[in-house]
Image: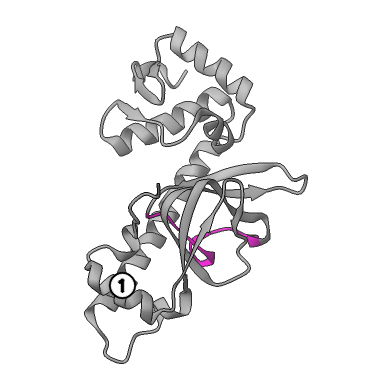
C-alpha cells in the first residue's frame, strides 16, 4: 500500500488546493520507482520531490565506488541547483525502497506567473530556504569527512545529530551500512570502532537510537 503523498518543505505554507493548481500549471510529472532503480542523473534541470518512499543521493568516484551524500525521505528535494557539487557527472539519486517522485522543471519555479500570486512567492522563498539548508548540510558533511580517524568521524557525526535533536539522545536517520557510506569508511572497521565506543562508555545504543554519554571523553 502506498504511503500518503508528502510534498514537504518546497510547498511549505501553501494550501493543498493551491499545491494542486500549481502542479498543474507547472506541468509536473509524477513517476514511481522500484528498489535500486536510478531516479535522477543530473542531466536535466528538473527538481525532484519525493512524495513517499526513500532514496539516496550518491557520489561515484573514478573507480566506481559509491558514497552516500544524503538520504532522502518523504518531502525530500533534489536537483542540479541543490547539488553543490563540482562535478554533477559523478552524482545520481537511487531508489532505496519503492518510491514516488514528482518532477518539476526548475524554470517554472523561478518564473513568476502573470498574476504574481502570493503562493508563487512563497514557493520561491521555500526554494531559497532549501538551498541554504543544503549548503549547511554540505558544511556538516565536510566537517565529518575532514576528521582523520573513524572514531573522530563517528563522534563528529553523533555530535551533529545530538545538536540537531537538542538532546544527547538521538535517532540515526539511516542504517549502519549507510552510516559507513556517509563517513566514507569500511563498515566492518566502523562496527569495531562503535564497539569500542560502547565498551568505553562514550556512547550507548539500542537499534538506531544513540546516546552520547561522556562528552569530555569524545575528543581523545
Snapshot quadrant of residue 68: top right
Residue 74 on the magenta span: no
Name above or below for residue 198 compared with residue 85: above
> Which residue appears at 50% of the width and 43% of the height?
141
Tell me how the rendering is colored.
one colour
Residue found farthest to the front: 1
- From the viewer's perspective, is 197 left or right of 66? left
Q: In front here: 220 or 75? A: 75
Q: Position of residue 151 (x, y in %)?
A: 53, 22
Q: Position of residue 196 (x, y in %)?
A: 51, 11
For label 1, the SS is helix
Q: Is residue 14 visible?
A: no
Residue span colored magenta: 75-88
> Which residue appears at 51% of the width and 26% of the height?
152
Q: In front here: 122 or 4? A: 4
Residue 84 on the magenta span: yes
Name above or below for residue 153 compared with residue 124: above
Q: In front here: 99 or 136? A: 99
Name above or below for residue 115 compared with residue 3: below
Q: How many marks?
A: 1
Snapshot quadrant of residue 89: bottom right
Tell me the residue that label 1 is attached to. Answer: 20
Label 1, residues with CA under 10 Å away: few <14, some 14-19, many ≥20: few
Q: In front here: 87 or 15? A: 15
Q: Position of residue 75 (x, y in %)?
A: 37, 55
Residue found farthest to the right: 63
> Which residue appears at 53% of the width and 59% of the height?
84
Residue found farthest to the top: 199
> Which residue appears at 32% of the width and 59% of the height?
9
Q: Is residue 95 visible?
A: yes
Amino acid at each position: 500500500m502506498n504511503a500518503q503523498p508528502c510534498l514537504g518543505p518546497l510547498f511549505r505554507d501553501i494550501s493543498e488546493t493551491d499545491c494542486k493548481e500549481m502542479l498543474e500549471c507547472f506541468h509536473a510529472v509524477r513517476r514511481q520507482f522500484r528498489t535500486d532503480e536510478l531516479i535522477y542523473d543530473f542531466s536535466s534541470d528538473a527538481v525532484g520531490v519525493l512524495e513517499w518512499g526513500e532514496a539516496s543521493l550518491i557520489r561515484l568516484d573514478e573507480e566506481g565506488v559509491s558514497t552516500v551524500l544524503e538520504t532522502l525521505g518523504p518531502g525530500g528535494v533534489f536537483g542540479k541547483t541543490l547539488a553543490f557539487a563540482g562535478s554533477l557527472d559523478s552524482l545520481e539519486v537511487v531508489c532505496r525502497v519503492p518510491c514516488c517522485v514528482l518532477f518539476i522543471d526548475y524554470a517554472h519555479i523561478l518564473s513568476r506567473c502573470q498574476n504574481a500570486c502570493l503562493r508563487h512567492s512563497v514557493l520561491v522563498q521555500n526554494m531559497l530556504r532549501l538551498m541554504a539548508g543544503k549548503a549547511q548540510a554540505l558544511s556538516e558533511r565536510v566537517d565529518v569527512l575532514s576528521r582523520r580517524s573513524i572514531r573522530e568521524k563517528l563522534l563528529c557525526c553523533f555530535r551533529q545529530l545530538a545538536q540537531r535533536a537538542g538532546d544527547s539522545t538521538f535517532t540515526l536517520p539511516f542504517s549502519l551500512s549507510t552510516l559507513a557510506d556517509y563517513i566514507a569508511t569500511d563498515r566492518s572497521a566502523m562496527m569495531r570502532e562503535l564497539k569500542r565506543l560502547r565498551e568505553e562508555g562514550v556512547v550507548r545504543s539500542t537499534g538506531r537510537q544513540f546516546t552520547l554519554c561522556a562528552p569530555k571523553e569524545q575528543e581523545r
